[in-house]
Image: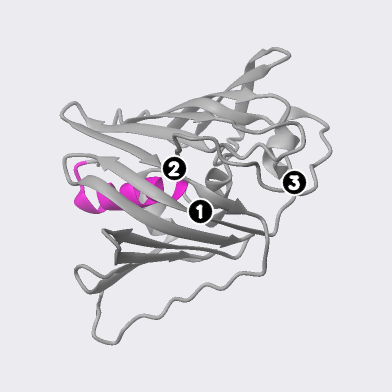
Amino acid sequence: MWNNRLSTDLLVVLLLLVTASCHRKIEPTPVPERSERTDIRSFMVDGPYDWEWFSCTGEIDMTSSMFTGTGQYTLRMQKDSTLWAVVRFIGIEVARIQADRDSLVILNRFEKKVDVYSWAEVRLKTGYPASLDALQRTVLGWLPYIPEALQVLQSDPGQVVVLGKEGQIQVQATLAEPDLIPIECLYRDTGSGMTAKGAQVILSDSAAVAVPKERSWEMRLDEKSRLFLQIDVDNPSFDGPLQFPFEIPDRYARH
């Protein structure tokens, strides 16, 4: 259930990792090779372009009943291998996060503890079909997962509207052509009634990869609780290789 504190904390972490927003134009990042498009579903599954490394920095703005404030982050990824992030508040590191194909590890500097979750545990606690692939897809601005039950509701020259369901999670998204990047989406947990609304603005030109730079998310766990996230994205890059420093101090409690 969504009143479970662990479920809430995990979903906040997932949203922090996959939400990005900026209030100014950022120069487009160089173009990885675009994928060949056959049909809509296979193009969405494979993604609009090929990549191996990705990194960015920026600011986190969060408003919720648990915490309201602004922090800074650094994020790096290697495709199908690792997602790594450092979060700072007023310049002091408060968390270091690393995800691989097996687990999500959260190093909490403030409380001097480390939490390790398998993806099966994350899916059980949150009801969301979380995985490394889903996180990496969302960081890049793609639809996080492509449900087996997916239908095209509308197809116009500029956009495509799709509806899908995975377990109890239903998603409806408006995708911008030509790369089928979501510009609006709505997630609903049909079991708990939880909803999450997202929006993305694509700032790019024909010579650049359409990585959304402006994103915002609003999530309601129940009628009285609201979580709103925006994250500034600076210096997006597909250059590599990258390093992922992650060492757990012996004095940290493990959960």
Q: CA distance from mark 2 to mark 3?
A: 21 Å
Q: Residue at x 81, y 34 (%)?
A: 37
Q: Is residue 95 left or right of residue 177?
A: left
**Picture coordinates of residue 72 (x, y %)?**
36, 55
Q: Secondary structure at mark 1?
A: loop
Residue 228 visible in the current orientation? yes
> Which one is nearer the viewer's eye here, 235 or 196?
235
Q: Which mark is residue 19?
A: 2
Q: Is residue 79 left or right of residue 67?
A: right
Q: CA distance from mark 2 to mark 1?
A: 16 Å
Q: Which residue is mark 3?
A: 31
Contact flag, marks 1 and 3 (Cβ < 8 Å): no
Q: Residue at x 32, y 47 (%)?
A: 12
Q: Which mark is residue 247?
A: none
Q: Tell me the quadrant of the picture where the C terminus can be found.
A: bottom left
Q: Which residue is mark 1?
A: 131
Disc on the earlier residue, 1 or 3: 3
Dot 1 amino acid type = Ser
**Picture coordinates of residue 238 (x, y %)?**
66, 56
Q: Which residues are magenta?
A: 3-20
Determine whether 243 is above or below 237 in the image.
Answer: below
Q: Is residue 48 magenta?
A: no
